[in-house]
Image (cartoon, helix red, strand yellow):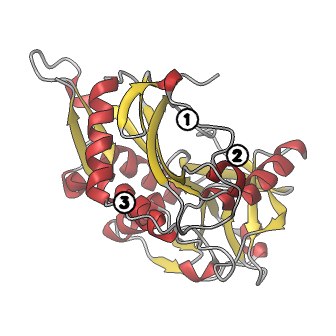
Amino acid sequence: MHNFLPIAYFEGQFRDFDDAKISIATHALHYGTGAFGGLRGIPDPGDAGTAGSPKRVLLFRLDRHCQRLSTSARLLNYDLPADKIQAVIGDFVRKNQPETPFYIRPFVYTSDLGISPRLHDVEKNFFVYGLELGDYLSPEGVTCRISSWYRQEDRSLPLRGKISGAYITSSLAKTEAVESGFDESILMNAQGKVSEASGMNVFIVRNGVLITPGHEQDILEGITRDSILTVARAMGIEVVERPVDKSELLIADEVFLSGTAAKITPVRRVEFYQLSTHRPVTDRLRERLTAITEGRDPAFQDWVFPIELG
């Protein structure tokens, strides 16, 4: 059961979430011609116990999320500036006055009513809604299977954007994993290398080195992924972006998944290979990223966007 925030932005205005509805004939519903973003917000932990200070929430890397959605919109032949998205999200947060950790879902889509698959001469639109969200996956760790489904290739689908139609593969892989007794799936690409999980990027640690598939492995350019790489380098952790073999998942010292919803989630088993519960690199990165998102790390203060609630 989801607890949705009460106000949504829909068709150019703010309205009650329950009144924000699309037609069953909406173009994007039939053809997957949409793209979405997702970012987290939390009540500012620094507000606690501070008498007279304004209530505010903290959004993590708002500018990057808005820029990525604007880029995704361009792939749909839709000009939607990042600064417009950012302004709408700021107003959205202020109108909802969230008091618990939450997730924001902005979505661009072909809103016309029609049956011809195309991106030209078709109306586009943009909406935003949100919901309360704690841990998406267990922070204690998850089990993963290697999916029988393969990650799409960029030559057949623009993987640099979060195109909604692409997530049929993620959905198939996730259900396959859960119905076969696992929590998550890891998809290989067409070259037989590790690509990503159903909605998260994949990292491994071997001999103290942090390793993750590069952009050429048909991954999504994850914002949390980018954050982890930047933070790891700042912490003096050696980072390598390269192809990763399936067998490396089984013998890695540590494996974790990353994403806006998943944050940093350790993997405790891949297929039937148990992984170590000693995860020094994962733990250090998770602690540092938590401090950053809570506004407690001056080195990355510019990644945190405070929204005053009044």
Going from N to C along the chain, the mark reached first, 2 or 3, is: 3
Looking at the image, residue 65 sits to the left or right of residue 210; the answer is left
Q: Nearer the viewer, mark 2 or mark 1?
A: 1
SS state under label 2: strand
Question: CA gap, disc 2 to disc 3?
Answer: 37 Å
* Screen quadrant of the N terminus: top right
Instruction: Give the residue number, with chain letter if any, for mark 2.
Output: 142
Question: Looking at this view, is 78 or 302 the one in front?
Answer: 78
SS state under label 3: loop
Question: CA gap, disc 2 to disc 1?
Answer: 12 Å
Q: Are marks 2 and 1 in contact (CB under 8 Å)?
A: no
Mark 3: few/some/many CA within 10 Å (<14, 14-19, 20+): many
The circle on residue 135 is 1
Q: Quadrant of residue 10?
A: top left
Q: Is residue 296 visible?
A: no
Q: Label 3 amino acid?
A: Leu
Residue under the point 58% across and 48% down: 265
Q: Are marks 3 and 1 in contact (CB under 8 Å)?
A: no
Residue 130's place in the image compared with 98, above or below, is below
Going from N to C along the chain, the mark reached first, 2 or 1, is: 1
Question: Looking at this view, is 105 or 201 the one in front?
Answer: 105
Q: Label 1 amino acid?
A: Asp
Residue under the point 73% across and 79% down: 193
* Screen quadrant of the C terminus: top left
Q: What is the x, y in percent for residue 183?
A: 76, 44
Instruction: Give the residue number, with chain letter if any, for mark 3.
Output: 80
